[in-house]
Amino acid sequence: MSRRKGGGGGFGRPQVNPNDLMRQVQQMQSQMESIQEEANKEVIEVSTGGGMVTVAINGALEVQKIEIKPEVVDPEDVDMLQDLVLAGVNEAITKAQEMVADRMSALTGGMGIPGL
C-alpha cells in the first residue's frame, strides 16, 4: 500500500481549517452589511426629458424625491409626464442596483457568488 505525501486535503489540495473559514465568512458578512448600510445612505439622481423630471433614490431603492418642472405639466398630455416619471424611476432603480453591485463585487473580488 502506498501513501501519498502532502497536505491531507486529498488531490493535492491543502486542508482547510473550518474555524478559519468560518471566521473569514463572518468577516465578509460584516463587510457586506457595512457596504449595504453605506449604499443605503447614498442618493443617486437621474433626470429624464432633458432635465424636466428628476428622480432621487437611495441604495435601499427608496425614492427620496421626484422633481417635475412646471413647464412639462400639460393637462392635455398627462401620458408624456407619466412616461417621464416612470422612465426616471426605472433608470434610478437600475443605477442604484448597479452601484450596490459594484461595491459588493469589490468585496467579493469576482468570486462568482450568486446574488452578490
Image (tube, rainbow, N blue to C red):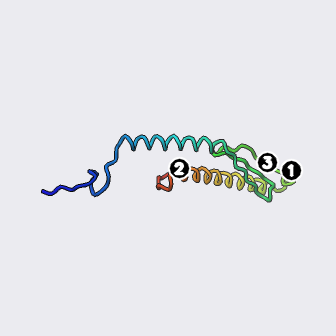
Frontmost of labels 3 and 2 is: 2
Total numbered labels: 3
Which residue does the image show at 58% across and 53% down from the upper left?
A: 102
Q: Which residue is mark 3?
A: 67
Q: Position of residue 111 (x, y in %)?
A: 47, 55
Q: Is residue 49 above or below residue 64?
A: below
The percent coordinates of residue 80 (x first, y second) are 78, 57
- 82 above or below 36? below
Q: Which mark is residue 107?
A: 2
Q: Residue furthest bottom?
A: 50
Q: Nearer the viewer, residue 64 or 13?
A: 13
Q: Residue at x 50, y 56 (%)?
A: 110
Q: Residues within 10 Å of mark 1 (few under 14, many from 20)?
A: few
The amino acid marked with disc number 3 is Glu
- Marks 2 and 1, Cα distance to the nearest angstrom? 43 Å
Q: Residue at x 44, y 43 (%)?
A: 25
Which numbered disc, 2 or 1, marks the residue that appears first in the sequence? Answer: 1
Q: Nearer the viewer, mark 2 or mark 1?
A: 2
Quarter of the rendering occupied by the N terminus: bottom left
Q: Residues within 10 Å of mark 2 (few under 14, many from 20)?
A: some
Residue found at the very far left of the displayed protein:
1
State which tag comes first along the sequence, 3 or 2: 3
Secondary structure of the residue carrying tag 1 is: helix
Q: Residue flagged by tag 1: what amino acid is it?
A: Pro
66 horizontally vs 58: left or right: right
Check residue 70 in the rendering and tell me which mark sits there, or answer none: 1
SS for tag 3? strand
